[in-house]
Amino acid sequence: STRHFAKLAAALAGAAVLTASLSALARELSVSTVLSDAFPWGQAAEKWAELVEERTEGRLTLRVYPNSQLVAGDQTREFSAMRSGLIDMAVGSTINWSPQVPELNLFSLPFLMPDEAAVDAVTGGEAGEMIFEAIESRGVVPLAWGENGFRQLSNSRGPIGEPGDLDGLKIRVVGSPLFQDTFNALGADPTQMSWTDAQPALTTGAVDGQENPLSVFDVARIDQVGQEYLTLWNYMNDPLIFAVNQRVWDSLDEADREILRETAVEAGEWEIAMTREEERARLADIQERGVNVTELTDDQHQAFVDATREVHDKWIPRIGEEIVEAARAAIDGR
Ligand code: X2X
């Protein structure tokens, strides 16, 4: 009957409204990472997702997509994809975003950061704010810092204790031009490739070496693809940044923005502490697996600093004198 039909239609319409409002309540946002939750980096993103789910009582769900899968493995396109809205959010490396945000090359200046306290002084101070402004001016909202770690050099050929030892070695570097300059300055033969391509290249011996933090070397078992020599040279620290696409950010109400920010800060602090705490045990494990570890004397360290000075001369104008000065002041005052 007509009355029956009207009732049914009303019920269906009600159900549709309910479904629509429920899905509006439970909003899913994508989070891109390069490394999975086998690594501290991926765990940082999972921690963020956990805290957000909890504190928004399920209103926001962060779904983490590791292995640069949202950019088909090309980690240097992550920032552009987040800016355009193809990706909602990311926990990303300053290295991978530096092609679009030149200021981020600050962290890759060889031997700028002597220790962890220096990193904290930079990220937590005026230089860090300037870096966040540079990101924001390019359409992405940065929320908090994490850490991939100090990057160390490994290779399959022999111990490296001075720049001359790198002569002619084929080194896989990330897809950021500054790294090409650093390894050219050291007399090596750098070749840019994504992390996805790096592992097969190491396995086949297409490259002789690579550089990554101890956590990456350890978890990815880089020694098992013939990288038996490791030099601890702390030549740069690779921070991570938690960030959100600008339009996604604008679409959230004040309370959810606050939750996203505070949980990013918490997840970042948690991940930085864990990464640093684990370094010593990771190094012991790596040595136990038979890797030959070289630590530099002060003179050896200085030889690397001198050999890479030209990289500073070339890149400081691109980063911005003001940011570099603010970073130096923070480091000196730490
Ligand atoms: O590609 C790398 O070496 C990695 C995983 O460390 C980064 O994404 C910067």
Image (tube, rainbow, N blue to C red):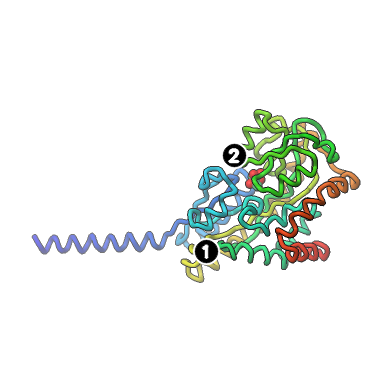
* Camera sees residue 308: yes
Residue found at the very far bottom of the displayed protein: 254
- The mark total stands at 2
Q: Position of residue 250 (x, y in %)?
A: 49, 67
Q: Is residue 53 above or below residue 298?
A: below
Which is more N-terminal, label 2 or label 1?
2
Provide the secondary structure element on which disc 1 rests: helix
Residue at 79% x, 55% y is 313
- For the N terminus, the image quarter is bottom left
Task: Judge from the rendering whether residue 284 lies leftward or rightward of residue 77; answer left or right.
Answer: right
Amino acid type indicated by mark 1: Gln
Of the numbered discs in the image, which one, if any, rests on residue 196? 2
Pick the front one: 33 or 309? 309
Residue found at the very far right of the displayed protein: 299
Pick the front one: 86 or 178? 178
Q: Position of residue 323 (x, y in %)?
A: 73, 64
Residue at 48% x, 54% y is 86
Task: Judge from the rendering whether residue 130 lies leftward or rightward of residue 229; answer left or right.
Answer: left
Pick the front one: 127 or 56? 127
Q: Is residue 52 above or below residue 219?
A: below
Q: In which quadrant of the rendered view does residue 226 lie?
A: top right
Pick the front one: 238 or 279? 238
Q: In which quadrant of the rendered view does residue 167 lie?
A: top right
Q: Position of residue 244 (x, y in %)?
A: 54, 60
Q: Residues within 10 Å of mark 1 (few under 14, many from 20)?
A: many
Q: Which residue is mark 1?
A: 246
The Cα–Cα distance between marks 1 and 2, rounded to whole angstroms, is: 28 Å
- Give the image quadrant in which the ligand numbered 1 is located: top right
